[in-house]
Image (cartoon, rainbow, N blue to C red):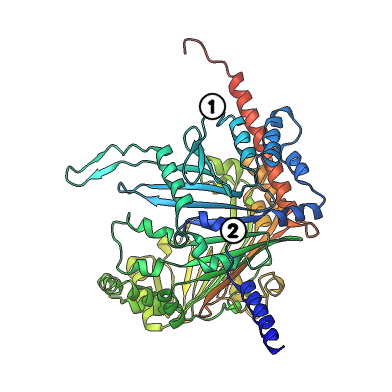
Amino acid sequence: MKKSNFYWQLIACLLFLSSCANKSPKEAAYIPKDATGVLALDMNALQQKLREGGMSTDSLIFIAFGNDSASEKMKKMFTEGKNESGINWNEKIFLFSNQQSFSDKSTSTSANMLGTLGDVTKLEKYLLRLEEFKDKAIKREKAYSYLQGTGDLQVSWNKEVCILTHYSHPSIPVFDTIEMIFKKPLIVDIPKESKAETDLFFSQKTNQSLASVDVFNQMFREKADGYIFSSSNSSLNLLKNLPFNPPKLEELLKNNYSTATLHFEKGKLRVQSNTYVNPALGNILSKYAGPVVNFSLVKDYPSKDINLVSLASFNPEIIGGLLKQVELESFADNFLQKNSLSIQDLYKAFKGELAIVVSDLKFAKPDPMMKRDELSLETGVPLVNILMRIPVGDSKSYSKLMDLGVKSGVLKKVGNQYRTASANAAGSFFVLGDDKNLFIASDSALYNNYQASIGKPNSFFSEAPFNRYKASSTVFYANIASTIHGLIADSTKTFNSKLLYQLANTCKEVVLNSDNFDGKTIHSQGELIMQQADTNSLITLIRFLSVTAKEVREQDEKFNAEISATHIPENY
């Protein structure tokens, strides 16, 4: 009996361990480990959100393309793709990009859509009916089959997945350092290069794919509507194109990963993100850990009509740590010494806290006395208040840095204050630096109003959606609606202004924040807050995109009609 219990306990333990293992999605085996970025959409979860909002996939296609005759072809194509392509639209769809560098310093980029395949025969019949492939022949390779379209489009598949690839490789002139001339760029064979990359997708080993990256696999443990993955490894190829490659820069850049989950909720799109860094970068972040954001820098700002707020806090010595890691500290020090500065002066001058506030953005009516050009005389110009506050760190280093501004004529020193030089004051920002803070403002009136409001806390900052992120190292807020209304006086003036006003009527504000490194990861989150608080954000965004798509089509039709109506003389 005891032996039997042991076996059951062992089985239970193995089941528990298997449930905790990093199960990789089968699609990950086809995505290169150094892919620039990956977006995975849980189609089943998204369709559930649509159903909860009273919208089916068929109604979505109808909303997106309307019922006019010009869009019937697109509606038919999407409906057939949904019902007859053989792709399982209830599984996850992966969108990923991949870059490669070449000897002529050019770079190719492929944009790929990868889906799970349910029926190979249906897919092949469907593809051969499409205009892009109807005169093409399916080519069979050992590991996959494919169709090469005209130019840069290709579809490849096996029994498990189907990959749609758009491949681009702009060629550039090559500079011959011996003859000192530019030579004709190399001839690019798009189909051949695209085929070579597809070979890689279907033949790569597990350790060459994202299936071997633990943080990629861990991302799918959390239930979400979408997933985002990015890697710094794609930038390693681009280092080859740099004229000067700093020592050990590759060590800092390789194997840094970011993951994020997307959640479409009522009234907002929420994003949760984690950044995982390599040991070299992690050691620097741990050694030079920074403080949290300082809300006291802006809490007395004298306006509630806020367009943008940006707060950041960090340990300035991290600049020296990064330069030392890539062995450029001496080089930077030697360069600064020409101006009687050291690299230490540069990062010790300020405390490592920064606050920026943008407010009261509005479109001023045309003023003939203040015209800048004929366009501003006709339409007016946007006016805005901007205040930047940077607390002072080491006073000696700060004075050295500011004295350079005095020497160059940009600043003047009055007592213990640095101010904007009168000769440079017109049409520029107002600058005032004392022994505690450096202020940069859009004008002196804003600075004076700010000083007068000290001790009178602004309720906007205690009620704003970013107020709960007081333990973060960075905070960013933008009021999308008020900013668009401030920049554009009339929504009917141009086609673009009409679209931007629709965006303002859809999205209210955005909030982003990031925490300090905790020894393993950097946690971040963001929220895109909608105007309609009682509607799922997926429904709201789909309606916005569908209206936008319709208006773009109508604009194109109008433009084409105007071109057709234009009479061009035969002998022109």
Q: Position of residue 50 (x, y in %)?
A: 77, 52
Q: Is residue 375 above or below residue 536?
A: above
Q: Is residue 380 left or right of residue 70?
A: left
Element class at badge 1: loop
Q: Residue furthest left?
A: 178
- Mark before the other along the chain sequence, 1 or 2: 1
Q: Nearer the viewer, residue 84 or 190?
A: 84
Q: Nearer the viewer, residue 488 or 109?
A: 109
Badge 2 amino acid = Val
Specify few, some or many for label 1: CA neighbours under 10 Å numbering under 14, 14-19, or 20 or more: few
Horizontal side of residue 415 vs 568, given as left or right: left
Q: Residue furthest top?
A: 571
In the displayed structure image, the side of residue 571 where residue 370 appears, left or right: right
User: Does any portion of residue 437 appear in the rendered image?
Assistant: yes
Q: Quadrant of residue 19?
A: bottom right
Residue 308 in view of the camera? no
In the picture as drawn, the residue positioned furthest to the bottom comes out as 2
Q: Is residue 250 above or below residue 170?
A: below
Q: Position of residue 22 (x, y in %)?
A: 58, 69
Q: How many marks?
A: 2
Residue in view at x 20 percent, y 47 percent? 177
Q: For residue 135, which numbered disc appears in the image?
A: 1
Residue ID at (69%, 55%): 507
The percent position of residue 458, horizontal first and vertical second, equals: 68, 74
Give 491 or 106, whichever is nearer the viewer.
106
**Quarter of the figure with the N terminus:** bottom right
Numbered label attached to residue 384: 2
Q: State the image coordinates of residue 548 (x, y, percent, origin top left).
A: 68, 42
How many residues crowd mark 2 within 10 Å: few (<14), some (14–19), many (20+)?
Answer: some
Q: Is residue 310 left or right of residue 201?
A: right
Q: What amino acid type should be assigned to the residue bearing mark 1? A: Asp
Residue that appears at 71% across and 73% down: 459
